[in-house]
Image (cartoon, grey):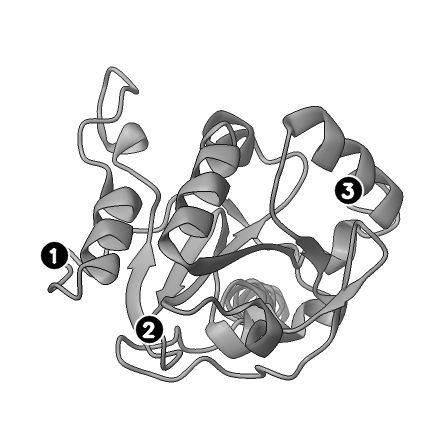
Amino acid sequence: MKKYISLGALALLLVFSLAFKGGKMLGLGAKAPMTDYSMQGTDGKKYNLAQLKGEKGLLVIFSCNTCPFVLAWEDQYPRLGKLTQEMGIGMVLVNSNTRKRKNENSMEAMQKHFKEAGYNTPYVIDQNNKLADAFGAKTTPHVFLFNDDLELVYRGSINDKYENQSKQAEKFYLEEALKALEANQEIDPADTREIGCSIKRQ
């Protein structure tokens, strides 16, 4: 009996450790980590956060090809890409799903998805989920918005679509945060609940 209890406790501990492997989430006001970390894009180019930053900041969205939450939200990506470009804010989509890299989140699958979904910003591979771990990113999608000093000013969700029974967005958190950042105004709310699929870490 004790043996079964010990094995059960060990299994629970393993599940817990895997679920929280990403570490502590990056706090508001914190500097973006690993800004010189090079990531391969679907266009064959290499990118890092320092290069991607625009004059007024940087938007990082952890994403993937197959999560139902991403598929339901990604129609916003091209619009956000155009909006950030007009605002002088850089934008990048980061795929950190290391355990799914050999199939639906391979570079080839990402290149195909990039075209089919009409993305207009860099879509890059985070090898061995290093950037996701440094950010403490938990889900796809998971949003992190930085100012011109690469300090975190907003984190969380794109909008409140999945907080409403109708699944219709009423509060556009990210868009409002972008507008406030552009206007040098306070962002409120600056921290919303990330909703999505867990990042498939190694």
Percent across and percent down for residue 115 are 74, 31
Observer-nearest of 136 and 17: 136
- CA gap, disc 2 and disc 1: 13 Å
Disc 1, SS:
loop
What residue is shown at x 25% (from left), y 35% (from top)?
A: 160
Q: Secondary structure at mark 3?
A: helix
Please tell me the numbered disc located at residue 188: 1
Q: Residues within 10 Å of mark 1 (few under 14, many from 20)?
A: few
100 relative to 17, above or below: above
Structural crowding at the residue carrying mark 3, measured as other residues with C-alpha within 10 Å and reported as few (<14), some (14–19) or many (≥20): many
167 vs 179, nearest the viewer: 179
Q: Earlier in the sequence, mark 2 or mark 3?
A: 3
Name the quarter where the C terminus is drawn.
bottom right
Residue 2 visible from this viewpoint:
no
Q: Which residue is mark 3?
A: 110
> In the rendered view, does 22 fall on the left or right side of 55?
right
Q: Which residue is mark 2?
A: 152
Q: Is residue 116 above or below residue 181?
A: above
Indicate the quadrant where residue 105 lies: top right
